[in-house]
Image: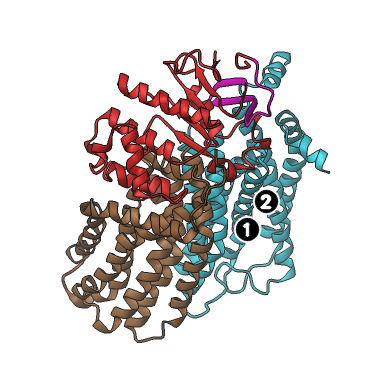
Chain colours: A brown, B red, C cyan
């Protein structure tokens, strides 16, 4: 029995995981679209609840968009690990002899491409409906791109912790939202500053730093949490 | 609770010493020991709820052992987990297949994260288990027995020396069981090892085949 | 030292030790609290700007420091439990959470009581109070996660990961909230901080701080004993000692 096997390189494994998850997403487009539709619906609630006057909506639009993006990203977490844990493929990953943290990071990155990136692209359009000036679009998309990345990593830690808990979605919100508050602060405030014509380099740099920090340490927490979750 | 039959003289590849496990309040495994040598099949038997699955999961490294030790080639687990897992193929009650992917896609991914593999090799293995007709169908369209065969194909394709299989022949028909027994015998001849939890014993009376009874 | 540590981590020994240590923490804590209260409420002069309202800092400030300190103790205990697989450390972490949460609640309540005369409202989005509120959410999340597992061991390890992630996040939360608040208003009068405090006002505060730390120690001993009893309810040493008494 040959005990020496050529194991594939790490970059190849990243590609494999991403290709698999993208293929699965293509076969289930409806699930990918749901968080995006949710995002649009939540932002529609605010004009209905507050006022149709664009002047009033404009003031709160950065906060509305950011809170809605945060909730949509939270909602999308439900589909991040649960299907794989339920059908036993996650167990196989844990036992694959490959670094679990890397596999889960690749999975989270794919998930962001499918659920985070559409939000980033959709946000300026929704922002316009809330009276947000066109000049703010780049800042809005930029903060959301950096910020939703952090939200995905923090959310993935929470999802890995709660995936084996029955009815874990409320618990997931309870764990993840407080951890995500700094991202919300920097993101929403940066857009607000941009609307007032002020410099936004500071908060943007902070968001980028947070993203780097979470991406470099988060996967270890995800892997540790996932090992506990597949025990049951 | 040592396994029946005297162990062969060589160093065991896999060894469990006095493994204890609790599930919540229940003291499930109370000092289980066994040794597995190259070319052996050990079948764990016992009534439902006695802890067969838990034993297999802790030997696979999915469930931490609360007392006792498990060794792979003389190295204690879980410290040696990465090397160990490269030599391990585990099959649970669930098949570990994505129902939206075809049999071939499932196998290609599952094997590729462990080693490089060609499509011919995948097709050959499917043919060996007589499910070549299923290779391009999404797994959701397969019968329970066909899904189990795809899962067994994955185990064979990993080229692992140790197979840990939880009730491998669930849902298999007579022909399927015979095919699978032949694959097991083949694996043992090549020096592979198999640990199963079983209600129905395989390859009874053959050399190297032992049972471990849990009470 | 290592041997002592090892001995302490055995449940029966820890249970007895916690019982022995507790009174030595509890009574000094009560005595110091009385001294601190007398010093703070009677001896200390009235603040020329804030009048008597400032006196709530003798409860508020120690509570606030403890709420943060306990979270750190909890995260360190959880990390020790995960890294060295010491079950007692997990029990310490579990015992810390509700105490820390109550100190956080006390901070928030005293903060709003102080806010009414000072700011004219019960709640102000002051950076300190806001980060205390987020800290309370972190505690609640930790306890909710713990409660959602049936198996104590899995609850221990899962909540330990959350505690570690949380403690890494605390400085980020703190910084972000200060930055967020600084956008809206310039530096304002003292708020709940105590800058350049006079000696006769300071010493009662320090005494109170010490009293609160000792009090935390005493409550931790109690809760730890409770945790150990719950975890070891089937252990032989416990049934034996119950049979004897």
Left-right relation of B178 to A104: left
Q: Is residue A29 visible?
A: yes
The residue labelled by disc 1 is C65
Magenta region: B6-33
Between C60 and A136, which is closer to the camera in this rendering?
A136
Q: Chain of mark 1?
A: C
Left-right relation of B162 to B94: right
Percent x, y of residue C168: 57, 59
Q: Mark number for residue B82?
A: none
Q: Residue at x 53, y 32 (%)?
A: B190
Q: Quadrant of the C terminus of chain B?
A: top right
In magenta stretch: residue B12: yes
The image shows residue A31, relative to residue B26, as above or below, that is: below
Q: Mark number for residue C212?
A: 2
Q: Residue at x 34, y 57 (%)?
A: A19
| SS assignment at label 1 | helix
CA–CA distance between discs 2 and 1?
Answer: 10 Å
The image shows residue C139, relative to residue B45, as above or below, that is: below
Give the prevailing secondary structure in the magenta stretch: strand
| SS assignment at label 2 | helix
Between A50 and B60, which is closer to the camera in this rendering?
B60
Q: Chain of mark 2?
A: C
Please rate how many residues cluster around mark 2, counting C-alpha atoms within 10 Å: few if below 14, some from 14 to 19, many from 20: many
Q: Residue at x 38, y 23 (%)?
A: B169
The image shows residue C191, relative to residue B92, as above or below, that is: below
Percent x, y of residue B2: 63, 17
């Amino acid at each position: 029995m040959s005990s020496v096997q050529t194991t594939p390189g790490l970059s190849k494994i990243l590609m494999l995981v991403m290709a698999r998850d993208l293929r699965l997403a293509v076969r289930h487009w409806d699930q990918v679209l749901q968080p995006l539709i949710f995002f649009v619906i939540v932002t529609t609630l605010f004009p209905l609840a507050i006022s149709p006057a664009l002047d009033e909506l404009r003031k709160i639009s950065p906060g509305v968009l950011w809170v809605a993006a945060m909730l949509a990203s939270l909602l999308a977490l439900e589909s991040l690990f649960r299907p794989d844990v339920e059908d036993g493929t996650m167990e196989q990953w844990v036992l694959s002899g490959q670094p679990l943290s890397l596999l889960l990071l690749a999975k989270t990155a794919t998930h962001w491409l499918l659920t985070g990136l559409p939000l980033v692209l959709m946000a300026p359009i929704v922002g316009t409906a809330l009276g947000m000036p066109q000049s703010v679009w780049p800042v809005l998309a930029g903060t959301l791109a950096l910020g939703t990345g952090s939200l995905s990593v923090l959310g993935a830690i929470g999802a890995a912790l709660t995936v084996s808990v029955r009815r874990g979605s409320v618990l997931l919100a309870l764990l993840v939202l407080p951890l995500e508050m700094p991202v919300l602060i920097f993101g929403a405030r940066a857009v607000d500053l941009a609307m007032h014509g002020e410099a936004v380099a500071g908060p943007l740099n902070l968001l980028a730093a947070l993203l780097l920090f979470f991406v470099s340490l988060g996967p270890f927490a995800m892997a540790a949490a996932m090992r506990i979750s597949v025990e049951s | 609770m040592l396994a029946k039959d005297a162990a062969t003289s060589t160093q065991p590849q896999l060894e469990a010493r006095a493994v204890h496990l609790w599930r919540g309040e229940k003291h499930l495994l109370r000092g289980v020991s066994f040794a597995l040598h190259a070319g052996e099949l050990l079948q764990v038997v016992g009534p439902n709820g006695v802890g067969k699955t838990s034993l297999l999961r802790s030997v696979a490294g999915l469930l931490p052992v609360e007392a006792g030790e498990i060794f792979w080639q003389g190295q204690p687990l879980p410290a040696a987990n990465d090397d160990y897992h490269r030599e391990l193929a585990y099959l649970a009650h669930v098949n570990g297949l994505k129902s939206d992917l075809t049999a071939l896609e499932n196998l290609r991914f599952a094997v590729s994260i462990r080693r490089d593999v060609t499509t011919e090799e995948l097709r050959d293995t499917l043919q060996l288990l007589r499910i070549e007709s299923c290779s391009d169908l999404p797994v959701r369209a397969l019968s329970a027995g066909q899904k189990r065969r795809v899962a067994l194909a994955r185990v064979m394709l990993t080229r692992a020396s140790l197979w840990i299989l939880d009730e491998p022949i669930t849902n298999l028909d007579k022909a399927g069981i015979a095919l699978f027994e032949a694959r097991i015998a083949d694996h043992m001849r090549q020096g592979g090892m198999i640990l199963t939890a079983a209600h129905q014993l395989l390859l009874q009376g053959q050399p190297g085949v032992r049972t471990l009874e849990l009470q | 030292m290592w041997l002592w540590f090892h001995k302490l981590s055995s449940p029966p020994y820890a249970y007895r030790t916690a019982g022995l240590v507790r009174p030595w923490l509890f009574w000094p804590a009560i005595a110091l609290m009385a001294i601190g209260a007398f010093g703070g409420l009677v001896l200390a002069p009235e603040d020329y700007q804030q009048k008597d309202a400032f006196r709530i800092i003798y409860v508020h400030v120690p509570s606030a420091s403890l709420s943060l300190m306990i979270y750190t103790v909890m995260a360190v205990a959880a990390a020790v439990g995960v890294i060295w697989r010491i079950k007692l450390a997990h029990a310490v972490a579990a015992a810390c959470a509700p105490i820390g949460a109550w100190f956080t609640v006390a901070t928030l309540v005293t903060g709003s009581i102080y806010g009414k005369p000072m700011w004219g409202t019960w709640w102000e989005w002051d950076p300190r109070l806001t980060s205390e509120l987020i800290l309370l959410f972190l505690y609640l999340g930790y306890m909710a996660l713990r409660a959602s597992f049936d198996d104590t061991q899995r609850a221990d390890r899962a909540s330990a990961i959350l505690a570690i992630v949380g403690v890494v996040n605390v400085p980020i939360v703190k910084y972000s909230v200060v930055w967020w608040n600084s956008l809206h208003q310039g530096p304002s009068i003292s708020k709940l901080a105590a800058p350049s405090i006079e000696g006769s006002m300071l010493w009662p505060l320090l005494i109170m701080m010490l009293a609160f730390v000792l009090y935390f120690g005493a409550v931790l001993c109690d809760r730890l004993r409770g945790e150990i009893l719950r975890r070891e309810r089937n252990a032989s040493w416990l049934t034996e000692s119950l049979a004897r008494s």
